[in-house]
Image: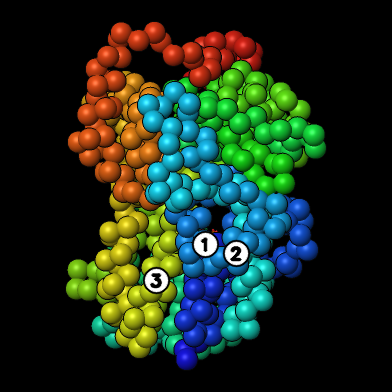
Amino acid sequence: MGHVGIIGGGVTGLAAALSLSKIGFQVTVFESDSTPMPASPEEAFNWNRRGAPQVRHSHALLGRLHNLLRDFHPEVLKMLLDVGATEIDLAQHMPDTLDDLSRHPEDRDLFMIAARRTTFEWVLRQIVMSNADVVIRTGERIRGLVATEGDIPEVQGLVFDDGGSEFFDLVIAANGRRSQVPEWFKALRIELPEEVEDTGIVYYSRFFRILEEQELPVSDRLIAGDLGYLKYGVFWGDNRTFSITLATSDKDKTFWGVRDPEVFDRVIREIPAASEWVSLGADPITPVHSMAGLLNRRRSLIGESGVVIKNFHMIGDALVCTNPLYGRGCSTGFWQAHLLAKAIEHNRNDSIAQAEIFSQDIDEHILPWYQASVDSDRSNRELENGVPSEGATRKSILQNGLLPATQTSAKVWRAFMRMMNLLAPPKSLNEPEIMADVLEIWEKRGERPAPPPLGPERDEMIDLLGLKEIA
Ligand SMILES: Cc1cc2nc3c(=O)[nH]c(=O)nc-3n(C[C@H](O)[C@H](O)[C@H](O)COP(=O)(O)OP(=O)(O)OC[C@H]3O[C@@H](n4cnc5c(N)ncnc54)[C@H](O)[C@@H]3O)c2cc1C
């Protein structure tokens, strides 16, 4: 039996601890945030998670994550449901305008989880803590790696902030988007291959709680949309909570005022799909949290001559992170932890083979989502800048072909839902049988009456809010 040291006790670090403990490893997780474990999900909502500030924002928990829990960690799913999360059965919310409303066997995979990110992490930590083979040490920040020198340095342990160190058979960095691995590698003279692209957005989220007697305003209206200058999404949480996120361009200073709760609430009142949630009786339970500096970034531990370091892996946002707008990070992070545990299980004493297999899995399963995120962000930027391009055509096909087709063709609805939930790759929507339906609708876009607007145009919104245009 080996002893694994995991740096970071966020979703991905905990997921790796869970999977590795089930295949016979002893695991110690080091989490720099020193906050003690809260007693309940409600307390966890106010958790001081400075090391992962995104926990204050809306989180979609997608089908891929739901199914990994259902199939490999049912105790986590059960506890989530016991503490107030719900499973969203997407087939139950098919638009009734579809050409076929029958359920298909594969719809058993089309389930999302409605829970706040803090509730999910709290449950995960509870389950992991109850495992005798895992120790979670909070308030312990890792400062570097103990490693041998040589062509391929071999990691032997971890260095702590106080200068002390401990030895491990294997180390996994799951320390998030602000991972310090690049600096640690510099000290070991290792080049860490990396590709970065700024998303150019600022994220604003506010949570609400529906009054006790109120039903969720479930409708067939899309609860995410793009007004061009502002994107919005409504996210179901647990225990009658929901959150609304607005995202603007980080260059659009006029809308930076959205951080003000009063301005935020006025904006959502102008967006029908969002306002129906708040207008039925819901109280805000947080201020408006904002976050900028959001990146698409991928790294790799395989250089030109192969694996660059032994006894060391990276997972989660530290390895691949994508624009949060697409709501995929926790699901792809959990998936990465699952894939890494499998690679380790089949090559227990060979970290090079583990890294090679894991890297192939990342290429096959995770990087298509990274690329989709980068491509979609580029198209958005081109549109914002008025550049006529292939990206702009793709966006028009999405808005005037694919999205309307999800309201009429059951085949397209299912393909779209499977893709959005990471159950089919991004390219699955280009399959000829799907594309035929989408293009047929797109080509007739001029013949249809314009759909009702998702919300006001930019100038109108500026007038409604009494904002001043800032250049
Ligand atoms: C605004 C925003 C909204 C998002 N919305 C969604 C969404 O809707 N759905 C979704 O699935 N994903 C979403 N994401 C992405 C998701 O939050 C991340 O992908 C996910 O948290 C990654 O998990 P992780 O465990 O890799 O990193 P994190 O959750 O960031 O955890 C890393 C942990 O490592 C700790 N740490 C860091 N350095 C050290 C160190 N040296 N020593 C010890 N501990 C350390 C940190 O304190 C932290 O707890 C969003 C992200 C952002 C920014």
Residue type at the position of mark 2: Val
- The kind of secondary structure element at disc 3 is helix
Q: Residue 129: horizontal and vertical position, in percent?
A: 65, 74
Image depth: mark 3 or mark 1 in front: 1
Q: Earlier in the sequence, mark 3 or mark 1?
A: 1
Question: Observer-nearest residue: 435 or 143?
Answer: 435
- The kind of secondary structure element at disc 2 is helix
Disc marking residue 455: none
Measure the C-alpha gap from mark 2 to mark 1.
Answer: 7 Å
Measure the C-alpha gap from mark 3 to mark 2.
Answer: 19 Å
Is 331 situated above or below 355? above
- The residue at the point 39 percent across, 71 percent down is 340
- The kind of secondary structure element at disc 1 is helix
Q: Which residue is mark 2?
A: 76
Q: Is residue 10 left or right of residue 282?
A: left
- The residue at the point 57 percent across, 24 percent down is 273
Q: Label 1 near label 2: C-beta < 8 Å?
A: yes
Residue type at the position of mark 1: Leu
Image depth: mark 3 or mark 2 in front: 2
Q: Which residue is mark 1?
A: 69
**Mark 1 surroundings within 10 Å by alpha-carbon count, few (fewer than 14), some (14 through 19), many (20 or more):** some
- The residue at the point 41 percent across, 64 percent down is 336
Is 343 situated above or below 324? below
Decide if residue 32 is in sight here: no
**Disc 2 Cβ-to-ligand 1 distance below 8 Å:** no
Measure the C-alpha gap from mark 3 to mark 1.
Answer: 16 Å
Question: Which residue extends farthest right?
Answer: 212
Question: Observer-nearest residue: 139 or 444?
Answer: 444
Disc marking residue 340: 3
Q: Residue 63: horizontal and vertical position, in percent?
A: 47, 50
